[in-house]
Image (cartoon, rainbow, N blue to C red):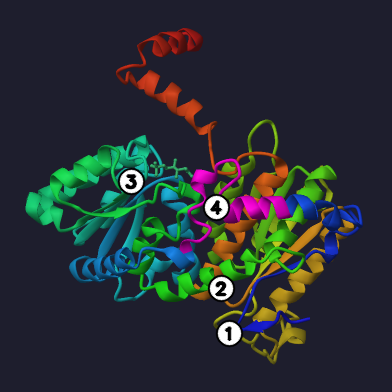
């Protein structure tokens, strides 16, 4: 059955038919009361982490003045530079990269275009990776968007030192000031102080929105707009999905997805594999992994979020999925149809025996791969959820972002955790600071060096 049309496009539909053999028949009614409670917590900000649900009404309440400034800054960057270095990590980078790769291509930088190249930096401590970006930048005119809510995260802070120095050397302090844009807390943090001192234009990560829920704030919007994506359409898609998610009940696709995940987890599944048959979806899957992993993986609980790219990974991970440990279920994101379809050519000699496909669209071939894989995996003991989305457009991305965020909030509450904190991320940071000799970590440093035998 085709998804219902709404306002000229198709809204997200969740198909749970292929999990029915793996979960109790009444799993949805059994979870309805918990879902209703979680719905209330998200809508009224009354649950655990209620200070961080600013994203729930963001597509309606976003700051129009800042939105206009983002668009103006994007235009300025397009005029002043042929490259934008986006410095950020985790929630301060994955959403922007996901949307840019999905809508503008993973090969965006190689394409002929009149928008700047994008280089993502500050998401690693690899010297080689940083060196390569500097090399790729070459003598291009560049701008910088440094993004860090806390303003203290080591990876982006270190990268920003390098690129700020490069920028100031090339354009002078005054010239650099015109090219550096900082997205950070409205009041706190060293990045905010530095930006104010230096006179950089700043954009805000709202207090009530944590990193992994921030792609529809300036965090994601500025780099996305620089690539020429229609921000109105992106926010419009999110707003349409916000309306749908605001209505609780069995028709709400986020309820359906959250309930299905919960039932599968309770039935013993430990891993959720997010699959898509579009290579451009790769970084949206990375964004999704952070969203679900950081929101749910705590207190010894939570599905492990992993991702695969089909059909490529059917030739690598396919064996394990079909016959390995029965730990996982699959959530397949299916796009409605490609933006550019191609028909398989006829070849009179038919040396490769492929004429049975001649004249058929590649999208048709891809769909048969999806259906064939679905049946094989379900028969192999891998339950299959389908998230059916519209065409790969800005509107669809907005819908999808909001849908996954909302379902994540619901899922975390069903699991009994606070979906908006990430206490575990601090452990490695403390160790790293101590080992690096950061002032204030002297005792910890001695303890760690002894453990390492150094
Ligand atoms: O979701 C989160 O909170 C994290 O992934 C952060 O986004 C990430 O650690 C980067 O933090 P910051 O923006 O403070 O540099």
Residue 216 in the image: above or below residue 443 = below
Number of the front mark, 4 or 1 = 1
Q: To which residue does mark 3 refer?
A: 185
Q: How far across and how far down the image is residue 187, in percent?
A: 28, 43
Secondary-structure class at tag 2: helix
Q: What residue is drawn where x is 30% and y is 72%?
A: 115
**Of labels 2 and 4, the one closer to you:** 2
Tell me if mark 2 has few (under 14), some (14-19) or many (20+) residues whose alpha carbon lies within 10 angstroms of its own. Answer: some
How many residues crowd mark 1 within 10 Å: few (<14), some (14–19), many (20+)?
few
Is 3 drawn above or below residue 279 in the view shown? below
Q: Is residue 89 above or below residue 69?
A: above
Q: Is mark 1 within 8 Å of ligand 1?
A: no
Q: Quadrant of residue 139?
A: bottom left
Label 3 or label 2, whichever comes before in sequence order? 3
User: Contact, CB < 8 Å: mark 4 with mark 1?
Assistant: no
Instruction: Classify mark 1: helix, strand or loop.
Output: loop
Spatial CA span between label 3 and label 1: 36 Å
Res. 240 mark: 2
Camera-nearest label, 4 or 3: 3
Does the CB distance between marks 4 and 3 fall below 8 Å?
Answer: no
Count of marks overlaid on the render: 4
Q: Residue at x 18, y 67 (%)?
A: 80
> Between disc 4 and disc 1, whose residue precedes?
1
Residue matched to label 4:
286
In the picture, the disc for residue 7 is 1
State which tag comes first along the sequence, 2 or 4: 2
Q: Are marks 2 and 4 in contact (CB under 8 Å)?
A: no
Q: Is residue 51 magenta?
A: yes
Magenta region, residue range:
36-58
Question: The N terminus is located in which quarter?
Answer: bottom right
Is the residue under label 2 in contact with that under label 1 (CB below 8 Å)?
yes
Q: Quadrant of residue 65?
A: bottom left
């Amino acid at each position: 059955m085709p998804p219902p049309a709404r306002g000229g496009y198709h809204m997200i539909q969740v198909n749970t038919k292929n999990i029915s053999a793996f979960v109790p028949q009444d799993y949805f009614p059994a979870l309805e009361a918990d879902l209703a409670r979680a719905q209330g917590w998200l809508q009224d900000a009354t649950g655990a982490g209620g200070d961080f649900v600013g994203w729930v009404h963001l597509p309606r309440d976003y700051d129009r003045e800042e939105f206009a400034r983002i668009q103006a800054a994007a235009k300025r960057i397009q005029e002043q530079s042929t490259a934008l270095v986006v410095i950020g990590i985790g929630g301060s980078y994955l959403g922007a990269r996901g949307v840019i790769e999905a809508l503008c291509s993973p090969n965006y930088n190689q394409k002929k275009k009149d928008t700047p190249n994008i280089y993502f930096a500050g998401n690693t401590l690899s010297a080689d990776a940083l060196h390569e970006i500097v090399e790729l930048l070459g003598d291009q005119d560049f701008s910088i968007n440094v993004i860090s809510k806390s303003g203290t995260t080591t990876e982006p802070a270190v990268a920003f030192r390098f690129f700020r120095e490069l920028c100031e050397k090339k354009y002078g302090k005054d010239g650099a000031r015109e090219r550096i844009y900082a997205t950070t807390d409205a009041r706190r943090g060293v990045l905010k102080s530095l930006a104010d001192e230096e006179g950089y234009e700043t954009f805000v990560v709202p207090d009530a929105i944590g990193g992994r829920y921030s792609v529809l704030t300036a965090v994601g919007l500025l780099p996305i707009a620089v690539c020429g994506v229609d921000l109105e359409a992106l926010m419009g898609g999110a707003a349409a999905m916000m309306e749908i998610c605001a209505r609780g009940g069995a028709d709400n696709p986020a309820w359906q997805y959250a309930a299905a995940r919960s039932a599968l987890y309770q039935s013993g599944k430990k891993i959720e594999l997010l699959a898509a048959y579009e290579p451009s979806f790769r970084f949206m899957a990375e964004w999704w992994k952070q969203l679900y992993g950081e929101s749910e993986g705590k207190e010894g609980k939570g599905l492990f979020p992993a991702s695969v790219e089909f059909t490529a990974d059917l030739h690598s991970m396919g064996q394990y999925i079909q016959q390995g440990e029965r730990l996982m279920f699959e959530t397949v994101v299916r796009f409605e149809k490609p933006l550019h379809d191609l028909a398989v050519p006829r070849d009179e000699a038919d040396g490769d025996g492929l004429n049975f496909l001649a004249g058929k669209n590649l999208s048709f071939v891809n769909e048969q791969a999806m259906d064939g894989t679905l049946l094989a995996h379900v028969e192999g003991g891998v339950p299959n959820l389908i998230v059916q989305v519209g065409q790969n457009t800005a509107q669809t991305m907005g819908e999808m972002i909001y849908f996954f965020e909302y379902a994540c909030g619901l899922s975390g509450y069903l699991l009994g955790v606070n979906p908006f904190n990430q206490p575990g991320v601090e452990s490695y940071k403390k160790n790293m600071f101590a080992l690096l000799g950061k002032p204030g970590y002297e005792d910890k440093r001695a303890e760690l060096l002894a453990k390492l035998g150094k």
